Image (spheres, rainbow, N blue to C red):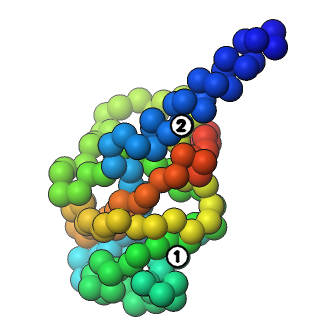
Amino acid sequence: MKTRHLLLVAAAAVAAPAFAQSDAQCILAGRLDDQGRWAPRFAGVQLLGAHGQAVNGASKQLVSAVSQVRLAQPALLSRCNGDQPLASADGEPRGQKTQVSALARGVVDVEGVSYPKLRTGGELVELRVRVPAERVVMISR
């Protein structure tokens, strides 16, 4: 029993860095409406500028210049979509809750910002983040 537990812990330790260093990882910070205003800004996500100051404006220019993000709660990690069309789950049955990867709360560096377009108008604010392996947590979703 003890050996099996040690093997599971070792496997998790090996898998976490591989996950964090694989394809680029992104989180969503919110949505911009058709006029480029936050609609809504996700609760628990605070954008920070180059010197750690909060970015309070909602213009694309200000949002594009963020260098860090402060998370008050874990944020789901996803593959970065950039300008690619977003996947649609229309017509799909509701799935069971499962464990998914998330970025733990705290401050993390932002490497880039993209704006995937929504079919209903507006754009998502997608932050490409640097994901340290020790900050990856699993949450039920």
Q: Quadrant of residue 111?
A: bottom left
Rendered residue at 52%/52% (across/down):
132
Relative to 137, is 130 above or below? below
Relative to 87, is 34 above or below? below
Residue 59 horizontal side relative to residue 26, left or right: left
Q: Is label 1 in a helix, a strand or a loop?
A: strand
Residue 76 appears in view? yes
Q: Quadrant of residue 89?
A: top left
Number of residues whose C-alpha sits closer than 10 Å to that of mark 1, classed few (under 14), some (14–19) or many (20 or more): some
Q: Given the image, on which type of amino acid does mark 1 rest?
A: Gln
Rendered residue at 48%/53% (across/down):
131
CA distance separating discs 2 and 1:
25 Å
Residue 41 on image: x %, y %: 46, 74
Residue 47 horizontal side relative to residue 80, left or right: right
| Residue 16 image label | 2
Quick one: 13 or 90, which is closer to the camera?
13
Q: Are marks 2 and 1 in contact (CB under 8 Å)?
A: no
Rendered residue at 25%/66% (across/down):
115
Residue 37 appears in view? no
Relative to 112, is 14 above or below? above
Q: Given the image, on which type of amino acid does mark 2 rest?
A: Ala
Earlier in the chain: of badge 2 and badge 1, it is 2
**Residue that numbered label 1 is attached to:** 46
Q: Is label 2 in a helix, a strand or a loop?
A: helix
Rendered residue at 18%/57% (across/down):
83
Residue 119 horizontal side relative to residue 9, left or right: left
Number of residues whose C-alpha sits closer than 10 Å to that of mark 2, classed few (under 14), some (14–19) or many (20 or more): some
Q: Quadrant of the N terminus?
A: top right
Q: Quadrant of the C terminus?
A: top right
Quick one: 123 or 20, which is closer to the camera?
20
| Residue 78 image label | none
Residue 102 on image: x %, y %: 54, 48
